[in-house]
Amino acid sequence: MIEIEEQGRRLLITVGGEEEFLIRPVDGETGAALLSGWLAVIAKVFGNEEQLELDLLTAAVGDENVERVRALRAEEIYEVTMAAFFWQTAGGIEATRAFVGGDRPKAIRVLAESSGHPVLVTLLGGESESPTSPDATPATSTPGGSANGSPAAAPAP
């Protein structure tokens, strides 16, 4: 279980009421790169997902937090990384609150709408009000669902 709180321009993530991570904001270009990288992981566009996921973890939580985050349990790593991810990207605190509150479809919807890419709602959320073609089939996997067991989430050997 994680809790989030914005402190000025930073995001405080507390894990289990004990471990605190203060996340510094990234610039807009890095936030856009985070979103692009996340989409690539979901779509498995690149061949080296392990390195890309590690890069996304580092960009989302910051260099100063990576080793501490990797020392958490796998579920906690996922929760912290995704909370930081939504906050660092166009989704901001609204998407982060939705994610932490368990409403992941809303988090994705907020991110998609805020980033100016409403088609992401259809592709990632599986919602389709008006498909662009008769053979269009929305994705059935949950975004970030593979991150729980991803190599980036595992502590370094």
Image (cartoon, rainbow, N blue to C red):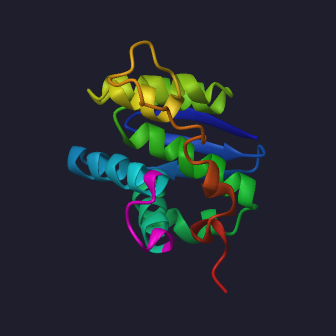
Residue at 36% across, 40% down = 89
Residue 57 falls inside the magenta stretch: no
* 17 sits to left or right of 110: right
Check the image and report above or below for 79 versus 108: below
19 or 110: nearer the eye? 110
Q: Is residue 70 visible?
A: yes
User: Left or right: where does residue 73 sit relative to residue 24?
Assistant: right
Total labels drawn: 0
Please identify the residue farthest to the left as the structure is shown: 29
Residue at (54, 22) in percent of width and height: 106
Q: Residue at x 48, y 32 (%)?
A: 137
Q: Position of residue 140 (x, y in %)?
A: 59, 37
Q: Which residues are magenta?
A: 43-50
Percent across and percent down for residue 68 are: 62, 67
Residue 26 is at least partly visible in this image = no
Nearest to the observer: residue 141 or residue 58: 141
Residue lying furthest front = 134
Residue 45 sits inside the magenta stretch: yes
Position in image of residue 138 (x %, y %)? 49, 32
Residue 89 to residue 19: above or below: above
Residue 39 or residue 89, whichever sits in front: 39
